[in-house]
Image: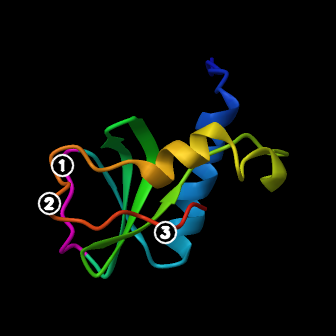
């Protein structure tokens, strides 16, 4: 007998995003056990910021290059861009890593 577990929309979105990122050559890792030397592109899940967590922090050649937020299917960009969460992410710093990385200027 197979047990079906109902996933939240964000969880389903993250699974789909993982597949897309991996298909594009990104290495997906979990915080805090991540290795920026694992590949040229590393996506770290649930990275802590001073204002909370981001779903993915994208590193390109060991430098933070973007933030990716998982949203349920059907969420429009107009519902995300300019939102309080987007502004919070753009002005956030990285807990414990502030002296290592420049502020991220891109949100996907």
N-term mark: 3 or 1? 3
Image quarter (top left, top right, bottom left or bottom right) of the N terminus: top right
Q: Residue at x 34, y 42 (%)?
A: 49
Circle 3: is it few (<14), some (14-19), or many (20+) Cα within 10 Å?
some
Q: How is the image coloured?
A: rainbow
Q: Residues within 10 Å of mark 2 (few under 14, many from 20)?
A: few
Which badge, 1 or 2, comes first in the chain's sequence?
A: 1
* Residue topped by disc 1: 33
What secondary structure is marked by label 3? Answer: helix
Q: Which residues are magenta?
A: 32-38
Q: Position of residue 85 (x, y in %)?
A: 59, 40
100 left or right of 92 in image: left
Task: Find disc 3 in the rendering and name its residue.
Answer: 22
Residue 93 lies left or right of residue 18; in this view the side is left
Q: Quadrant of the C terminus?
A: bottom right
Task: Indicate whether residue 60 is drawn in magenta.
Answer: no
CA separation in Å, label 1 and label 2: 19 Å
**The label number, if any, that marks residue 50 in the structure image:** none
Which residue sits at x=17%, y=54%?
Answer: 97
Front residue of 96/13: it is 96
Q: Position of residue 79 (x, y in %)?
A: 80, 44
Mark in front: 3 vs 1: 1
Which of 51 and 41 lies nearest the eye of the viewer? 51
Circle 2 sits on which residue? 99
Task: Identify the residue shown where x is 48% and y is 48%.
Answer: 89
Alpha-carbon neighbours of circle 1 within 10 Å: few (<14), some, or many (≥20)? few
Q: Is residue 103 above or below residue 38?
A: above
Position of residue 55 measured from the top left corner of the image (x, y, whole percent): 48, 45
Q: Is residue 14 visible?
A: no
Mark 3 vs mark 2: in front = 2
């Amino acid at each position: 007998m197979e047990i079906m577990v109902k996933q939240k929309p964000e969880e389903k979105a993250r699974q789909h995003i993982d597949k897309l990122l991996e298909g594009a050559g990104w290495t997906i890792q979990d915080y805090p056990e991540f290795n920026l030397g694992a590949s040229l592109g590393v996506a770290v899940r649930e990275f802590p910021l001073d204002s909370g967590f981001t779903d993915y922090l994208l590193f390109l050649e060991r430098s933070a290059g973007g933030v990716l937020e998982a949203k349920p299917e059907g969420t429009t960009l107009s519902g995300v861009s300019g939102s309080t969460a987007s502004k919070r992410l753009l002005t956030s710093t990285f807990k414990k890593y502030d002296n290592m990385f420049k502020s991220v200027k891109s949100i996907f």
